[in-house]
Image (cartoon, grey):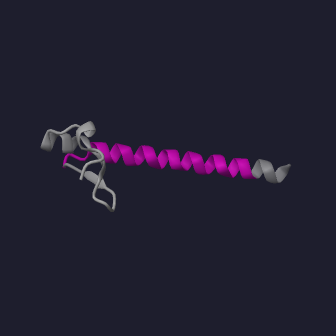
Amino acid sequence: MLGVILDITQRKHREDEISRNRARFEAIFNSITDGVAFADPQRRIQAINPGFTRLFGYTEEEVVGRT
């Protein structure tokens, strides 16, 4: 029983850390004034920041998934 409790506790700590890191990344990504786009190895756009929208005028819906 103790092993199960420790495993659940460790998992919860890891999930909390991932959540904090994700929030930190999103805050940085969204506050960069330069246009930033993330693409996969096939050059399909996966995400853009607000700077990209201001710079190029395209919305996320218009560019995500395109090359």
Q: In this view, does 53 lie to the left or right of 19?
A: left
| Residue 62 sits in quarter | top left
The overriding secondary structure of the stretch rendered in magenta is helix
Q: How many labels does the image show?
A: 0
Q: Where is residue 51 in the image (x, y as percent from the top left)?
A: 20, 43
Q: Residue at x 33, y 58 (%)?
A: 40
Q: Which residue lies furthest to the bottom in this view?
A: 41
Say if the magenta span includes residue 22.
Answer: yes
Front residue of this view, candidates 51 and 44: 44
Say if the magenta span includes residue 5.
Answer: no
Q: In this view, does 26 lie to the left or right of 11?
A: left
| Residue 39 sits in quarter | bottom left
Q: Which residue lies furthest to the right in this view?
A: 1
Q: Which residue is drawn at 14% across and 39% down?
A: 57
Q: Which residue is drawn at 25% across and 48% down?
A: 66
Which portion, as a residue range, is magenta?
Answer: 7-34
Q: Where is residue 56 in the image (x, y as percent from the top left)?
A: 13, 43
Q: Where is residue 3 in the image (x, y as percent from the top left)?
A: 81, 54
Q: Residue at x 54, y 49 (%)?
A: 17
Q: Residue furthest left?
A: 56
